[in-house]
Amino acid sequence: MIKNDFAAILTGANDIMNRTPLISLTTDFGLLDPFVGTMKGVIAGICPGAQLIDITHSVAAFDLLEGALAIWQAWRYFPGDSVHLVVVDPGVGSERHPVLSRMGESWFIAPDNGVLTLVERDVRRTGGLIEHRRIENPKYMLPRQSHTFHGRDIFAPAAAHLASQIERGQVEAESFGQVIESLIQLPVPEPVRKPDGSIEGVILKSDRFGNLLTNVAAGDLPGGDDHPVIELGSLRITRFCRFYAEGKPGEVFGIVGSSGLLEIAMNRGSAKDETGGVAGTRFRLART
């Protein structure tokens, strides 16, 4: 029994020392230009054993909130010790700082511009570990840095070096740079509950199917079958569905999507096109 336990301990230690590091990538670079491929080439040259997973490269250009939503929707479904590389960086070359963040069991490499706001908010709510550091050590950057492509010259190398440390089982976060107390936070709109019990919400984004993602969480909605009316402009949406196909083709309805947020959707059609709703459009949830 003791021998078997000791063997199990050794096996676990070997697993830690030989783990395959995982790096996710979220950017607004698109795939028409060589930016994403170049970053992956830099990572491969530093940590060839890293597994790379694309979350998305279709964040709208310079849209920090959309980038924050993309990584927030995805990160919790990755294994612990994953490295999440997020490059939505309209301030590239300016005074904003590149940062390494440990939040929960995951690592994040990103510009300090608010793109990690929603992840940090969730981790704080659950009492998870949070530590932020500036990336200052030139050892973890390319020898020469462009003022216009820090994704290649700073963020990708830093993520790859961190992944190498994870692969060896010896993470030295302190070697990247000094601790900072807090990150810049995006002013993410919160739903507002009115005295009459109604809720004023706002559309955060639309997905490629035309579904409108809102800032109203499932917990803000009445329980059971007591659904409010969604008032969006002159449109009154009275139907709530459990899944998209439950709605009639061409029907606009409310639904709690996979992110746990209320969506305004249409079965086999675009709620965005049908309603004219876009990011920033306000709506009201009124009692029936």
Image (cartoon, rainbow, N blue to C red):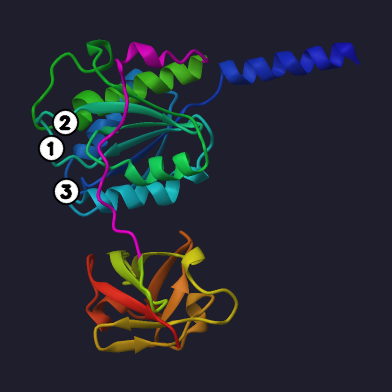
**What is the quadrant of residue 40 in the picture?**
top left
Which residue extends farthest front? 195
Q: CA distance from mark 3 to mark 1?
A: 9 Å
Where 157 sits versus 23, above or below?
above
Q: Residues within 10 Å of mark 1 (few under 14, many from 20)?
A: some
**Magenta range:** 169-191
Q: Which residue is mark 1?
A: 91
Which mark is on residue 62? 3
Residue 32 can be seen, yes or no: yes
In which quadrant is the N terminus drawn?
top right
Local secondary structure at mark 1: loop
> Closer to the N terminus: mark 3 or mark 1?
3
Q: Amino acid at mark 2?
A: Arg
Q: Which residue is mark 2?
A: 96
Which residue extends farthest right? 1
Q: CA distance from mark 2 to mark 3?
A: 14 Å
